[in-house]
Amino acid sequence: MENEQTNDEFQIKTSEFYRKSNKTNSYDEILNLTGLNIDKLYQYDKGIVKEIDLYSPKEKDEPFLHDKVSGNFHLLPNETKLFNEISEDIRKKRDDILNKLEEKINEVDKKKIVIDKRAGSGGNIKKAPNNDFKSGGKLFSYIRVWKNYIPYDLMFIRFFIDENKKTVNCILKSFQFCRGDFMRSYLAYPTSADSPAEKRVEFMYYNPEVTFDTPDDKVAECFLNFVKNY
């Protein structure tokens, strides 16, 4: 019961934070706010990371590209069929890893680590009023656990900053772990797609070695070790 109460308290805090969401599709505004241009979108596919066409917001689109409160970016594939295929792959992968994670958290861990089943299942970002992308699908879904009042996320997309070009980039179907919350996320994006960790005092991103091809139980174990060690 104590863990459930702790989880509820932080769910409220999380909801209040993201309820302030204020998104923009303006590249100029994003550059002024963050100092970053949006560059490339990639997809991990059977051991290969390949560039795919990035969807550019249209005038009729609802704002989605950058959240000025959370600092999150939302880069989408241009091709609707590919978007929906990747979204479905992420949905299935999230369900499978979540099941393995539950199996791996033993009775001792349950006293310290709480799986937040209400967080991260949506991942919905609307592309346009005609809803071509099924309300954003599951691209931005994640798995969240709590330890010592701190949220830990397993995400299915990987963001990184190219410091030379001052750009933000994203790899779909590539894991990234996060510790902490309630700050502008791009400030902690790693400076490489392959660097294992970018540490901050209370907020960090971590690029694990596991891939979408790694067995689900190994991914769950890797994430759980991250939670325990950080």
Image: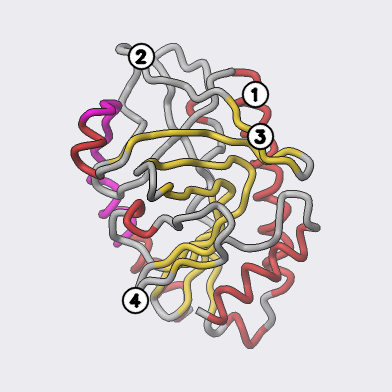
- Against 92, residue 188 (above or below) is below
* Other-residue count near label 2 (Cα within 10 Å), few / some / many at <14 / 14–19 / ≥20: few
Q: Residue at x 56, y 37 (%)?
A: 138
Say what secondary structure mark 1 lies in. Answer: helix
Residue 28 spot, x, y in % from top left = 22, 28
Q: Earlier in the sequence, mark 2 or mark 1?
A: 2
Give me the C-alpha separation between circle 3 and circle 2: 25 Å
Q: Earlier in the sequence, mark 4 or mark 2?
A: 2
Region in magenta: 13-28
Magenta span includes 107: no
Q: Type of residue at label 4?
A: Val
Label 1 or label 3, whichever lies nearer to me, is 3
Q: Which mark is residue 201?
A: 4
- Against 123, residue 131 (above or below) is above
Q: Type of residue at label 2?
A: Lys
Label 3 or label 2, whichever lies nearer to me, is 3
Q: Earlier in the sequence, mark 3 or mark 2?
A: 3
Q: Which mark is residue 185?
A: none
Q: Residue at x 57, y 80 (%)?
A: 228
Which residue is identified by label 2? 58
Depth check, front residue: 6 or 160:
160
Which residue is identified by label 1? 82
Say what secondary structure mark 2 lies in. Answer: loop
